[in-house]
Image: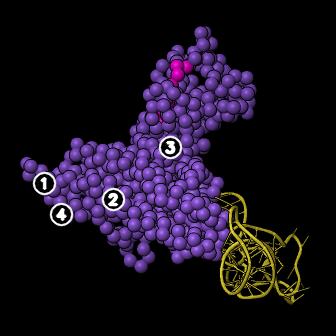
Amino acid sequence: MRLSKAFIPTTKEAPADAVIPSHILMMRAGMIRPLAAGIYSFLPLGYRMIKKVCDIIRREMDAIGGQEFHLPALNPKEIWEKTNRVEAFGDILFHVKNRDYVLAPTHEEIIAQIAADHVKSYRDLPQIWYQIQTKFRNEPRPRSGVIRGRQFLMKDSYSLDRDWEGLDRSYELHAEAYRRIFTACGLKFFEVGASTGAMGGTGSQEFMVESDAGEDTCAICDNCGYAANVEVAKAKVEDYPREEKSEELHEIYTPNVRTIDELSEFLKIPTTKCAKSRVYIHNGNPVLILMLGNDEVNEEKLVAALGGKVRPAHPEELMEITGADAGSIGPINTSLRVIADVKLRHANNMVSGANKNDYHIGGIDFDRDLPNVEYFDLHFVNAGDKCVQCESPLRVVRAIELGHIFKLGTKYSEALGAKFLDERGEEQPIVMGSYGIGVERIVACLIEQNHDEKGIIWPKEIAPFKVHLIGVNMKNEEIKRTCEKLYHEMIENDIEVLYDDRDDVSAGFKFNDADLLGMPLQVIVGEKNLSMNKVEIKFRATGEKKIVELGMLLRTIQDELYLP
RNA sequence: CGGGGCGUGGCUCAGCCCGGUUAGAGCGCCUGGUUCGGGACCAGGAGGUCGGCGGUUCGAAUCCGCCCGCCCCGACCA
């Protein structure tokens, strides 16, 4: 591609409303332009990257037996009502105004419908069906460039199996395909267990990329590879450092002391001698939750521990339930079910609320005074906590979700009548899985992981072009002739090359554009080197420069690009 | 949805508080010339309903009201 003809509108300055590196650089490199909040036009260079990512995805999906579909984005609302997802998605679902249609945010329903119509026998299974298609979601707050948009490209696939063992196989095939896809893209990623949320089903797993621009928080162990969303992450829990002698229970007058920090300050004791109380309503009944010091209740873990529905009690409910306001509630003299975080097991000489405003109780020995307390892991993991697997310190990092795979089960097949006959002639629901990858997010994450102050640094696996050929001064006939020759040679040798043949910009301008656009190798044809029949190769990633004989150039490029 | 910020040529912004020439600068763009290894220089030029509507005023980019749009933090998020 000749830069003199290409539409790649680079800019020196970043638009004021772009904040994260990938957004700034995609704008500056002329890859995207915004149309409205969370809606972007992909320009030729940006779309070239999208296509490269899609090529890799198709290759790996086809390799696990996937068959590519193209399903409609415009769906009758009726089919979404059959699975109750008009309500489940709520405002996220785009509705068409002048007909009873919705814009599809995902395609389980459509797949299940096709399966219901045409998959009749166990002989038809298993199937893996996929597509790469635009999804529409009315996100309340789009952000971070293409990372969270209202319209975005998703590779979504669906597995159809006759039983749960089959689903396990299809799910594992996807997990492996996803690992190959992200690896082929040159991404550093990790996998975490995840909650299934509104998708339903029995299991799910997310593929994440560590990034400050991420919307999720994960705990990861660099030593053994353990990684989990903090919603579910566990760390090794140390035994509570129990004191030798347990004090008697005693009431303490604590006027206007509400928070753990105030209590710790007032009594001159560490926060780890305090047990914080929280009241939740579980399936309509109040339960008292005790946490160590300032630990917050991880509600996802609480739901997992108790099952059913859980919500925090409203402040106005507290007095009626406990006889005190928040800040003076505690486990002694209460008839509530008491649940404590595992960090409090065997704790003694603890202070907690007295269920009487302005009073606390000291000398609480969990073993002696609270024999009926139930213990669960309810705290959030903190950076530096020890890994549950190997006891190395955990890191807590922000991360971007690139892919998510779900074991759906029979929720959609039952709702839409997707059934088949097994060998015994008995009708069974198809067991489904669903799997998604955010295509633009791959491109954004590549930039998040590979950039510097000058611009993008594409990994050589997936750069839009492998070589950026620069003629320093195109008005010099010798330079021009050499560049043209090299350009054609590279094309003939299947080396993707972006050729800066512009004759109206200065050398410095070209160098800066080349660094911004970030192709792995820059080939610089300048007067001085050319007079000795040589050209320069610059490696974008390291800045390293090499002077090469013209005759050795192609060989050198091929070696640099294709050798491991 | 709560909180905050912003909206002035293609981009980055000044002007607004304290109303009053013809609304400015840098970058970009066009023409001509000189340059050509790290975002060159000279000369000339094009380009603006100051987000929209309404109000106050002799007079509004500037003051007031409503609306729209965009960004950030949070809530939410398969």
Compared to A364, does A548 lie above or below? below
Task: Based on the picture, tell me whether residue A233 belongs to the magenta stretch.
Answer: yes
Instruction: Farthest residue to the top: give it.
Output: A245
Please give the chain letter of the residue carrying mark 4: A
**Residues under numbered marks 3 and 1 in contact, where contact means CB atoms less than 8 Å apart:** no
Residue for badge 2: A58
- SS for tag 2? helix
Hue used for the chain lettered A: purple
Asked if marks 4 and 2 fall on the same chain, the answer is yes
Residue for badge 4: A118
User: Residue at left 24%, top 54%?
Assistant: A65
Q: Nearer the viewer, mark 4 or mark 3?
A: 4
Query: In whole angstroms, how far apart are the C-alphas of marks 2 and 1?
Result: 25 Å
**Residues under numbered marks 4 and 2 in contact, where contact means CB atoms less than 8 Å apart:** no
Asked if marks 3 and 1 fall on the same chain, the answer is yes
Q: Nearer the viewer, mark 3 or mark 2?
A: 2
**Residues under numbered marks 4 and 3 in contact, where contact means CB atoms less than 8 Å apart:** no
Amino acid of disc 4:
His
The segment highlighted magenta reads A232-240
Q: Residues within 10 Å of mark 1 (few under 14, many from 20)?
A: few
User: Residue at left 56%, top 26%?
Assistant: A331
Q: Quadrant of residue A57?
A: bottom left
Q: Which mark sits nearer the N-terminus, 3 or 1? A: 1
Q: How is the image coloured?
A: by chain
Figure chain in yellow: B
Amino acid of disc 2:
Arg
